[in-house]
Image (cartoon, grey):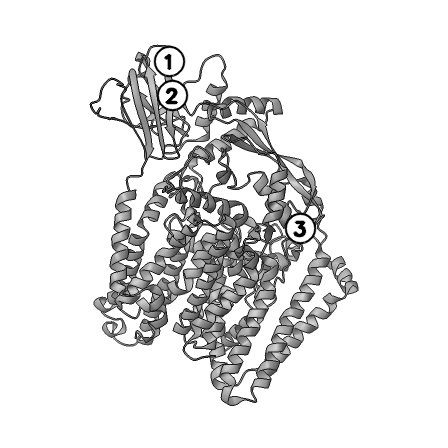
Amino acid sequence: MPPLRPYRWIAVLAIIGCGLLFGSVLVGWDRLAFRDVGHFYAPLYGHLGQRMADGQLPLWNPLDHTGTPVIGETTTAMFYPPRWVFALPLAPAVATGWYVVFHLVVAALAAGWAARRAGGEGAAAVFAGLAYALACPIVFLYCNPPFLVGAAWLPCGLALGLQLLETRSRRAIAAAALVFAMPVLAGDPQTPIHIAVWIGLVWSGRQLGRVWRHGKQKRSRAIASPTQRNTLVVPLLLAIGGALLIALPQVAGSLDWARHSARRFDVPQGVYHFSVAPWQWLDLLVPSSNGQLFPKLQRLSLLIPEDSRIWSVSLYGGVLTCWFCGWRYCKPLQLGAWDLLAPLGVLMAMGKFGPVWWSQVLAAGLGADPEGAWRQADPADWSPYWMLGQMLPGYESFRYPAKWLPFVSLGVAIAAARQLQDVLTTGRPPLRAMATGAGLLLLASLPLSLSAARATLLTQLPAANLSDNYWGPLDADAGLANLAFALRHAGGVLAAATALLWVLRRKPARYAQLAGFAVCGLLLVDLLIANKPLVATLDRQQESAWLDAVPAVAGGQTFLRTGDESPAVWRRTSVRHRVEEVSASERIGLQGRWHLPAGQRVFNSAVSITPQRYASFAAASAAYTAPLSWEQQNRFWLQVGGHWGLTAYLHTAPEAIATDTLDGRAVRLMDTRAIPLAAAAPTVRWHPRWNPIAAKIEVPQQDWRQHFESLLDTAQSPVPTVEFKGEPKFASEVVKAGSVAKLEVVEETAERLRLTVHGAAAGLLSRHSFQDGHWHCRYRPLRADSDEPINWTSAEVYPVDYLGQGVLLPAGDWEVEFWYRPWWLTPSLLVAMVALMVVVRSANTTIFRYVRGANNDQ
């Protein structure tokens, strides 16, 4: 291993590893096809990239609900530079692959640099970079690109934050500001918060340690002076302030849209979903020890009633990584900042599995709670994740404790690298312990390798008729067989490492270099084998053939998605190509965000941040239609949905479409069809009367029920409800009853609408577009015979019927223009540009040059 050049080796090995895992995606043969990347982010980023390539700055998305702000939906990553790759002339599937691989390489380089800051050099730094970036929880984040970005920048953020507690370097402050801003710009503001939590704990621990060491001395000598203590915190605060300024456009947009979020008004649902159960941590040593989730359901942990939802199919980061890490933690208690990283991540990632849960399990096992009174307590109470939510207002809105898993992977990788550094320096690896561990793993695999032994074990497992809507029935026997393979895999890798290190001990002069090569190479092979089943792809040529065979849906539709989640046959059967069936069906049926590139509007689509008004509408309509017959429900949506421009159902039937792959395999695709509901409604309407009410912050379900009743009352025309903050400009009672206006749309884009209005009396001009406070309107008289410029008159845009918008116009012939422009956009962009220039000027270098030379900074 060439000395002092670990980053070159990290980059080369990480690129090789990513190429082997994602090569078919990078060259355009396949596309990533599992979870959010398959149906949410790839079409979303592709759609926004196309709009950017057309010369637009996308600000408003009219195709979800009644419209959503693009910047306000944080995961759009509008101002994150690497995300602009989707504006290049690349297929979105290819751009997604390069986006993922780029961040995995960044993660490897960042982890290697952090390992050097923690004391690992040369091969140890390379080992840490590979052990982190190619760990299963990190690679599996290809399914969720915003959190992959956060994981990529996490090591640099932690190392720089720790450095800022010890130095006032301008370059370190500038680099930290850039690194802290990157996840925020990419749609993951939670990672910088986690970094701040860790840095805060480290700083607090150091202050308490100083008090402990000098506890018998005078207080003036026990604690540093206030000036000295503030000096340790000021650089970190400056970096945080710089990051906020650099990311200000995204921060402003997110905070602005958060005012409308349903999570602001209600207790967040599913906060502790994706808590990592205690038995799932066995994955750190044995790959996928709990079983595979796809393409066939072989997840053995599902047999445990307390098993939680799965964020990462495997937590594996290499058996050597786990071994070296465990060896380090077996030494006398380590209290360094880096040694606390993995334990903190484990405690947080466990979520609801805290002390109350453990006491409940213990009480149930000992029979100490016969009446089940203790079981009534919330198991999440007093867990570390619960306490963090209590201390940080609003933190629970982020949800999902498993988002702390990158801390575990990084902490384990750095601990292993530091222990490997000791091994390479001393030349004395624990060969006997490694051989013993390898033997135990191989021995444990023997019974599970025998079909008769597995059959006997299956009779002892709890009987459960488990099945997944997508991946079919649980195959416990295959799960046990895969567990046997995983044990053989881990044991074999550990045995190979033992043999290599034993042989290389005979060459003490070159031991460190050769052993470093051997361990890093073995780790790379180990992680590639473990990760290969987790990378789900779909052949693009096959997908195109299926798309061509399905009748195209007419454009300009507004759909209401209805029906089953998946075909019934998927739940009953299990096939190796189920990933292809699911992913292709999602695209054909415009699931997730696939309606965006298709140019179709879906009223009840899935978005990252759901506005409270829509969430309340969805809950109220579900409650209202629950007792109704199919005919009555159809009438409801004909009236209520027609009011919002719905033209068809996008209905998924319980049956499946039988077809074949290009190579002749039988497949079953989701049967999703467009069922006409009503003719397309005009985008704008004229109302001679309206019902003025005071502006609302929150719309309860009862208000929606009253709105439904008015729309369903066929005895009279519905009167729109308009929210005013003050006195309306025109009173509805003075308008001539029955007055109408002629409307003609001249131009309509996502962020702009121009039309002409010919009205004999004043009235309300409404449209199906959400008013988040940043839609503006102006109007001027129509005078075809005048060459003189005519001044515009501003008109306030009011919320109409809670989910729409409108303006009040006087009688006359008018040219009217609506446009979308948040007030904070231009100022925040200017501030961000100035802040970025100041940071770069202060650093006097790029972040990448700083990473290479930072070790010489002190």
SS assignment at label 3? loop
Between circles 1 and 2, the one closer to the viewer is 2
Q: Residue at x 37, y 45 (%)?
A: 254
State the image coordinates of residue 462 (x, y, percent, origin top left).
Answer: 71, 55
State the image coordinates of residue 760 (x, y, percent, origin top left).
Answer: 32, 12
Q: Is residue 719 left or right of residue 500?
A: left
Q: Could one spot residue 443 in this view of the protein?
A: yes
SS assignment at label 2? strand
State the image coordinates of residue 176 (x, y, percent, origin top left).
Answer: 33, 62
Dot 1, how many residues are within 10 Å of its Cα: few (below 14), some (14-19), or many (20+)?
some
Q: What residue type is labelled 2?
A: Glu
Q: What residue type is labelled 3?
A: His
- Cα distance between the residues tagged 3 and 2: 51 Å
Residue 744's disc number: 2
Q: Is residue 851 left or right of residue 827?
A: right
State the image coordinates of residue 133 (x, y, percent, origin top left).
Answer: 49, 64
Q: Which amino acid does label 1 sit on?
A: Val
Position above or below: 48 against 136: above
Q: Residue at x 54, y 45 (%)?
A: 39
Q: Could one spot residue 204 in this view of the protein?
A: no
Q: In this view, does 459 lie to the left or right of 236?
A: right
SS assignment at label 1? loop
Residue 577's disc number: 3
Q: Pointer 1: what residue?
A: 740
**Dividing the picture into quarters, in which one does residue 522 lie?**
bottom right
Q: Is residue 636 left or right of residue 739?
A: right
Nearest the eye: 657 or 733: 657
